[in-house]
Image (spheres, rainbow, N blue to C red):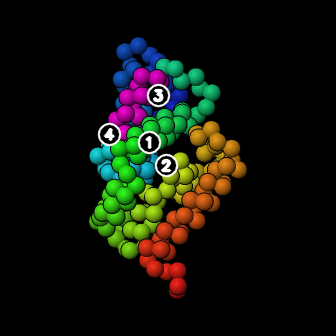
Amino acid sequence: MTEISNKKILDLFATPGKKEIGFSLLVKKYHKQIYWHIRHMVLVHEDANDLVQDVFLKIWKNLNKFKGNSDLYTWIYRITVNETLAFLKKKKKSYSIEENYESVSKISINSTTISGNDIESHLQKALYLLPPKQRTVFELKYFQQMKYEDMSKILNVAIGSLKASYHHAVKKIKHNVQLNLNLNDK
């Protein structure tokens, strides 16, 4: 089966009586990408699922306002990033740093996002300790392998700032992994 175009999805969504079909195709096309972007940003699978629902609800309510000035994927990703950052900000207010670190420390080696080796486990923990915006930049660049130009459109941030943020994120992750594995002396 060939992948349906964004134009076809938007046309169906705008057609009376076919709105649900268009939206269903949009969900089918983008669900996995949205889930994994969010999952790399939040600790708990259930939180990621809740956020995916929130993102699609926001898309449902606002898709008729999409002007087409950017790619549909960019618009959806912007909503995803905004919802995820809002969630993390709300979560930060309800948890202390110590509680957050305890949650991160309890990440199971058997988690679906960790392959089982110790370095990867510490890498995942270090990632969760990054500030949310830095984590977003790292996630988009490292996991999504997105170009800085595309990231700039999604995040509405200058390319130079994104490069600096990614560089700082890499340094922090490297430092945390080395610290946790006692690699500083080796």
- What residue is pinned by disc 4? 50
Residue ID at (31%, 50%): 45
Residue 117 % position (x, y): 37, 74
Query: Where are the magenta residues, as a range?
Result: 50-63
| Amino acid type, callout 2 | Pro
Q: Is residue 115 above or below residue 22?
A: below
| Amino acid type, callout 4 | Asp
Disc number at residue 89?
Answer: 1
- What residue is pinned by disc 2? 132
The secondary structure type at the circle numbered 2 is: helix
**Is label 2 or label 4 in front?**
2
- What residue is pinned by disc 3? 9
The secondary structure type at the circle numbered 4 is: helix
Q: Looking at the rendering, which quadrant does residue 15 occupy? A: top left
The secondary structure type at the circle numbered 3 is: helix
Dot 4 crowding, Cα within 10 Å, few <14, some 14–19, many 20+: few
Residue 85 % position (x, y): 47, 42
Circle nearer the N terminus (3, 2): 3
**Is label 1 or label 4 in front?**
1
Q: CA distance from mark 2 to mark 4?
A: 18 Å
- Magenta-span inclusion, residue 56: yes
Circle nearer the N terminus (1, 3): 3
| Amino acid type, callout 1 | Lys
> Decide: marks 1, 4 in contact (CB < 8 A)?
no
> Decide: marks 2, 4 in contact (CB < 8 A)?
no
Residue ID at (36%, 23%): 20
Residue ID at (60%, 60%): 168
Residue 44 % position (x, y): 32, 51
| Amino acid type, callout 3 | Ile
> Decide: marks 3, 2 in contact (CB < 8 A)?
no
